[in-house]
Image (cartoon, coloured by chain):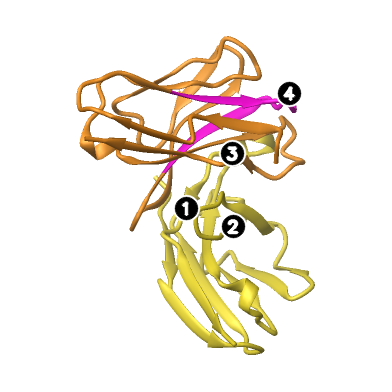
Chain colours: A yellow, B orange
Amino acid sequence: GENVEQHPSTLSVQEGDSAVIKCTYSDSASNYFPWYKQELGKRPQLIIDIRSNVGEKKDQRIAVTLNKTAKHFSLHITETQPEDSAVYFCAASQGYGGSQGNLIFGKGTKLSVKP
Amino acid sequence: DAGITQSPRYKITETGRQVTLMCHQTWSHSYMFWYRQDLGHGLRLIYYSAAADITDKGEVPDGYVVSRSKTENFPLTLESATRSQTSVYFCASSDRQGNSPLHFGNGTRLTVT
């Protein structure tokens, strides 16, 4: 079955710097790759997602890149702010439509942004 | 989001007892999911449902039972709770087309003593 590896497990940056989190997946049939942000004691919330027919997607300070050949995808956060501090999870799915919620998650990266 | 609610928020039970976690959504989403979250493991899918009366196993289904008699409800039952089932449980839902992101509930923190 699918396996998703996420690195690093912890990441500390200075406010204003960039942060990059990387994930690799094992099953080439995976076609949907979301990223979730989870603040302490709260539910995971989707911040950005990408599908296998797209190489890059941006949303303000957040971007995701996908390399299907190498089977890895990355989250890039620019101009980090203290409120970006949270645990970030990558995930992969082979589903279409609603079944894309059948996700395999990475183990998470705890991002700390120091003021 | 108020559209998906889980109850209870916190539950303490003893080993061997049966416990049911409730999940209710008001969006009429076709798909519903149960995930568990443990330190060092991230989130893992337990069961999911594509529609009423249709359920399927996820990554870690052993020790759990689900049902979906109505579209809006997706209860998760631990028939005989074990300490290894101490976890935070998240319910989630998604529409059939996948146009909406996966919406998670607030979670239930379950402790098995």
User: Can residue B54 be seen here?
Assistant: yes
Residue range highlighted in magenta: B21-36
Judging depth in this view, the residue of B109 and A92 nearest the camera is B109
Q: Is A75 left or right of B26, judged from the image as shown?
A: left
Q: Residue at horizontal 62%, vertical 72%? A: A84
Q: Are marks 1 and 2 in contact (CB under 8 Å)?
A: yes
Q: Chain of mark 1?
A: A
Q: Amino acid at mark 2?
A: Tyr
The answer to whether tags 2 and 4 share a subunit is no
Q: Are marks 1 and 4 in contact (CB under 8 Å)?
A: no
Residue A108: give x, y in percent of width and height.
Answer: 45, 62
Q: Amino acid at mark 3?
A: Gly
Tag 1's secondary structure? Answer: strand
**Which residue was labeled with disc 1?**
A105
Q: Residues within 10 Å of mark 3 (few under 14, many from 20)?
A: many
Q: Amino acid at mark 1?
A: Phe
Q: Are marks 2 and 4 in contact (CB under 8 Å)?
A: no
Give the CA distance from mark 1 to mark 2. Answer: 10 Å
Residue A66: give x, y in percent of width and height.
Answer: 62, 67
Give the CA distance from mark 1 to mark 4. Answer: 25 Å
Please identify the quarter of the rendering in which residue A74 is found: bottom right
Tag 2's secondary structure? Answer: strand
Q: Which mark is residue A10?
A: none
Q: Is A96 left or right of B60, judged from the image as shown?
A: right
**Which residue was labeled with disc 4?**
B28
Judging depth in this view, the residue of A114 and A97 nearest the camera is A114
Our reading of the magenta stretch's main secondary structure is strand
Q: Are marks 3 and 1 in contact (CB under 8 Å)?
A: no
Asked if residue B32 is among those painted magenta in the image, a careful observer would answer yes
**Which residue was labeled with disc 2?**
A36
Give the CA distance from mark 4 to mark 3. Answer: 15 Å
Judging depth in this view, the residue of A88 and B61 nearest the camera is A88
